[in-house]
Image: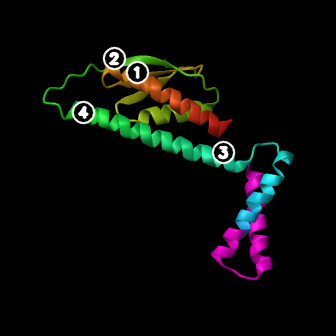
């Protein structure tokens, strides 16, 4: 992937130098030409087309943003009630991710969504222990978020 970005930037600078115009517009048009060239030559690279990973990263950010907003509304609903009716607890959450990067990213995303905190990752990296705000309801919400996060993380890392 780094080679593709480097080739794309090289084509953009070459385009700008050959146009004999040092402007951002000239660089941007060269960058677009570079994207086209790298896309045409994509089968000669060992990794997939790099913009595919960039779009997957933007999708992962969007999923996190959406899940964060939904869980924030859920937590705010519990906090503004006159009587606090929550049953906090810890539960085990299994994961199908394999690499250290994927497991760490999933743990961070679950922790950053309000109402849940990853307390421990098992040594085999196949499960988390998660502390949740309201145990019966939060388990379903965290599992749903985990499935969405895992799908988006796989798109970025594989």
Q: Secondary structure at mark 3?
A: helix
Q: Say which label, 3 or 1, has the lower sequence index.
A: 3
How many other residues sit within 10 Å of disc 3, few (<14), some (14-19) or many (≥20)? some
Residue 15 rendering spot, x and y as whole percentages: 77, 72
Residue with the mark numbered 3? 53
Numbered badge on residue 140: 1
Question: Callout 2: helix, strand or loop?
Answer: helix
Q: Is residue 25 magenta?
A: yes
Q: Is residue 143 above or below residue 49?
A: above
Looking at the image, residue 86 sits to the left or right of residue 126; the answer is left
Regarding residue 101, the answer to whether it shows in the image is no
Q: Please state the horizontal and vertical placement of residue 102, each as a whole percent of the image.
A: 60, 33
Q: Is residue 35 left or right of residue 66?
A: right
Q: Are marks 1 and 2 in contact (CB under 8 Å)?
A: yes
**Can you tell which quarter of the image residue 100 is in?**
top right
Distance between the alpha carbons at the discs numbered 4 and 1: 17 Å
Which range is magenta?
1-29
| Residue at image location 65% in from the left, 37% down from the top | 157
Residue 116 lies in the magenta stretch: no
- Counting residues from the N terminus, which is met first, the one under dot 4 or under dot 3? 3
């Amino acid at each position: 992937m780094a080679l593709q970005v480097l080739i794309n930037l090289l084509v953009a600078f070459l385009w700008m130098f050959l146009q004999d115009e040092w402007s951002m517009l000239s660089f941007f048009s060269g960058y677009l030409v570079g994207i086209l060239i790298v896309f045409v030559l994509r089968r000669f690279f060992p990794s997939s087309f790099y913009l595919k990973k960039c779009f997957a990263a933007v999708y992962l950010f969007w999923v996190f943003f959406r899940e964060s907003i939904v869980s924030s509304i859920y937590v705010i609903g519990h906090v503004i009630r006159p009587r606090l009716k929550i049953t906090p607890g810890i539960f085990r959450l299994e994961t199908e991710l394999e690499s250290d990067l994927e497991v760490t990213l999933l743990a961070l995303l679950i922790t950053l969504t309000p109402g849940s905190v990853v307390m421990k990752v098992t040594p085999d990296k196949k499960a988390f222990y998660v502390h949740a705000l309201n145990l019966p309801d939060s388990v379903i919400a965290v599992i749903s978020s985990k499935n969405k996060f895992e799908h988006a993380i796989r798109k970025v890392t594989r």
